[in-house]
Amino acid sequence: MDCIIIDDDATARLIIKELCLKSKEINVVDEFSSAIDAIKYLNTSSVDLVYLDIHMPTFSGFDFIQTLKNPPLIVLTTSDKNLALEAFEFKSVVDYLVKPIT
């Protein structure tokens, strides 16, 4: 399963990437500090899964999901546990991880 990681926090991206490396089923193909850069990537490439931070500058994770016509599976990552109900209104969201992720 090919995936990308989108998070403005480099440490959070590293933690998620390290956890993915422990799985033989998940292949991290790229990572982005900006949702805008990730959208550009997805315009030319496809993935099966996206690890997506909700709170990012200028373009939120929710904004990101709404721009995708056929979104892949999405695991939301956030330090805000109060957005879970809103998160699962998106059909592509399959999980909701609250930071810190360990």
Image (cartoon, rainbow, N blue to C red):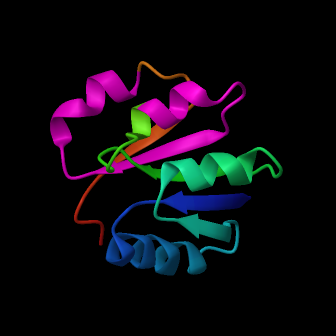
Residue lying at the far top in this picture: please name it: 89
Q: Which residues are drawn in magenta?
A: 63-88
Q: In this view, does 13 lie above or below 77?
A: below
Residue 24 left/right relative to 22: right
Q: Look at the image and say whether residue 95 sits in the magenta stretch.
A: no
Q: Look at the image and say whether residue 85 sits in the magenta stretch.
A: yes
Whether residue 102 is visible, yes or no, is yes
Give how far across and how far down residue 60 sits, in percent: 37, 40
Whether residue 48 is visible, yes or no, is no
Identify which residue, 6 or 39, lies in the foreground: 39
Q: In this view, does 11 lie above or below 98?
A: below
Give how far across and how far down residue 69 sits, in percent: 70, 24
Give how far across and how far down residue 49 sits, in percent: 64, 50
Q: Which residue is drawn at 28% across and 31% down?
A: 84
Q: Which residue is drawn at 53% across and 61% down?
A: 5
Q: Quadrant of residue 73?
A: top right
Identify which residue, 95 or 69, lies in the foreground: 69
Q: Which residue is drawn at 33% across and 78% down?
A: 11
Q: In this view, does 13 lie above or below 83?
A: below
Q: Is residue 82 above or below residue 27?
A: above
